[in-house]
Image (spheres, rainbow, N blue to C red):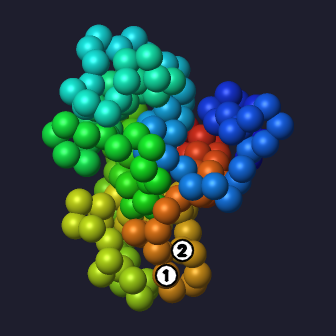
Amino acid sequence: MVYVYEAGLMDGISSTEFAPNASLTRAEVVTVLYRLADEPQVQTNAPFTDVSEGSYYAKAVAWAYGSGIAEGVTKERFAPNASATREQMVVFFARFARLSGKTVEATGDLRNYTDAGSVSPYATEAMAWAVETGLIEGMTEHTLNPQGTSTRAQAATILMRYCTMLG
């Protein structure tokens, strides 16, 4: 957590608290990736009615949407304050990696995990890639918990691994 905080990629929830066990929101995930991309210029707003123009995450959501990193939960809603699932977080990271010119193809599969069948079809390749590259580990030796919410600590760990292994 210190690594991502000192790199300016993640902030605490206050000036004295990081809240590692708090769930990570969809807005926070795209904000972290936006910072990792050096906050590029955003040409247009995202088409989501639940993303206020003046919010801290508005530019990040617009950038993530415009670059294909993130989609809404519907065409009109991004659900910025909803907790990001582990598979959503991994998909956002995989799309960011692809945008950054990295190969995001898994040669293996998820059959060693008893809950592999609960990975959404849109997330299967990204999850396999993240497991294969070591970005994400199972919650146990045999479970991924793809539908579970991501914690801020999990996101910080994945972000640090991304920066040190793939960055």
Q: Pick the quarter of the image with the C terminus.
A: top right
- SS of the residue at dot 2? loop
* Nearer to the camera, 44 or 132: 44
Eyeballing the image, is 67 above or below 139? above
Eyeballing the image, is 88 above or below 121? above
* Residue at image coords 30%, 81%: 117
Compared across the picture, whether 30 is left or right of 68 comes to: right
* Residue at image coords 46%, 53%: 83
The amino acid on which the numbered mark 2 sits, given as a three-letter code, is Gly
Label 2 Cα neighbours within 10 Å, binned few <14 / some 14-19 / many ≥20: few
CA distance separating discs 2 and 1 = 5 Å
* Residue at image coords 53%, 30%: 36
Q: Which mark is residue 92?
A: none
- SS of the residue at dot 1? loop
Compared across the picture, whether 132 is left or right of 119 comes to: right
Compared across the picture, whether 119 is left or right of 131 comes to: left
Is any atom of residue 56 visible in this view? yes
Is any atom of residue 97 visible in this view? no
* Nearer to the camera, 100 or 24: 24
Residue 69 location, x and y as percent?
32, 38
Q: Which mark is residue 138?
A: 2
Q: Which residue is mark 1?
A: 143
Residue 141 location, x and y as percent?
57, 84
* Residue at image coords 51%, 86%: 142
* Nearer to the camera, 105 or 123: 123
* Nearer to the camera, 21 or 163: 21
Disc 2 and disc 1 in contact, CB within 8 angstroms: yes
Q: Quadrant of residue 42?
A: top left
